Image: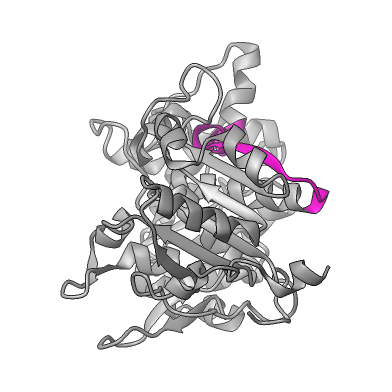
Amino acid sequence: MDPLLPLSGVRVVETASAVAAAYAGRLLAAMGAEVVLVEPPGLCPLRREAPMLDAESGTGALFASLAAGKKSVILDLSGAEGRAAFDRLLTGADILVDDTPLADRPALGLDREGIAGRHPHLVHLSILPFGAEGPKATWKGTEINVLHAAGEGALLPNGLSADLFPERPPLKIAGHFAERQGGVAGALSALAALWSGMGQFVDVSVQDANLAVGAFAIQRYGDGSVEHRSTRSFRYGGVVACADGHVELLTLEEHQWKGLVTLLGAPDWATDPALSDAAERSRRGAEINARIRDWARHHPVEELVRRAQALGVPMARYNSPEQVVSGAHERARGTFADLHLPGLPPLPLQTAPFRFGPDPLPLTGPPPAPGADQALLEEGAGTIPWRATA
């Protein structure tokens, strides 16, 4: 443990089989917590999620990104001996991160009442697709289920994408966007509970965490408005095609509109006095968009972004994955660090989506080999020294 990291000295025990809980553990590890992944004899299923970095060792890219900096022990919680070892581990832990289905928890010693009775000091963080309470608590749910159940999925694609491909059905955001939102909510909720100084059960629903993403659409239900992907777009701006790629343009403030007019070269249509009124610009959004798009398709992305940002116009390039990793902005911020795995070239991995000082948080280690830390299960090894002497 790095004593300079904010969660140094905190121990987290994780029983995760899906992305949301695993990402909550990853965020806590990034802040310096000792995160112990408890894997069943068949190992964490996330290890086998494609794409595989190394088929021979069974290391997948998703698992590597979610388990960096963690430790691993293998326990069979279906047996009394495994449950006893697990309880010893929890004795010295501060947080338990768990996504075990509710129906399976009692047999594994993970039920809410049992954990609270044996470990009253513990923050028991439960992360499930639809939470641990309510009519959907026992429902299964994957990324696509929770994304659409929260409303955001039905609104994609929109804007320019909907204009260009009106026949396409709703889309899933690439990767594990919804589940990672649940992981963020889980990590923050666990820390809030830890800050209280009291052991407690924390119930996180991945669906609820994603409702915040579509908060504006939900707010409009109050006046009877129901958004649809074919009509959900900025009045003007949004995704704009250029000569060699796409940019995102958004002008919400008056000075930003004036900067855009300058960027456009102050054509007669843009200097129409009527367009000095924001409401009129909204009414004529389709006309403005048509002119912006006709103009932008003659200009390269880098030129437009450079000129726009110099004028205070919010515009940014749509990056490919390679451009994200190698971008000047990301390099300057130290967003990515090299993850070193045996037999592979250095792999760029985001260290953490936050920082606590001028420097980014470091990568605290590679993903663990299965059962690499079985010594933690020895009698008494579960007690953290600072807790024993506190």
Residue 293 lies, in percent from the top left, at 41, 50
Q: Quadrant of residue 95?
A: bottom right
273 vs 247, left or right, is right
Residue 201 lies in magenta, yes or no?
A: yes
The answer to whether residue 177 is above or below residue 363 is above
The number of callouts visible is: 0
Tell me which residue sits at (79%, 46%) in the image: 198
Q: Residue furthest left?
A: 56
Q: Is residue 248 visible?
A: no
Quarter the C terminus occupies? bottom right
Tell me which residue sits at (35%, 38%) in the image: 142
Q: Nearer the viewer, residue 324 or 280?
A: 324
Tell me which residue sits at (72%, 36%) in the image: 277
* Magenta stretch bounds: 195-215
Residue 125 lies, in percent from the top left, at 60, 45
Q: Nearer the viewer, residue 31 or 309?
A: 31
Tell me which residue sits at (42%, 61%) in the image: 318
The answer to whether residue 74 is above or below residue 95 is below
Residue 25 lies, in percent from the top left, at 53, 59
8 vs 186, left or right, is right
Q: Is residue 202 visible?
A: yes
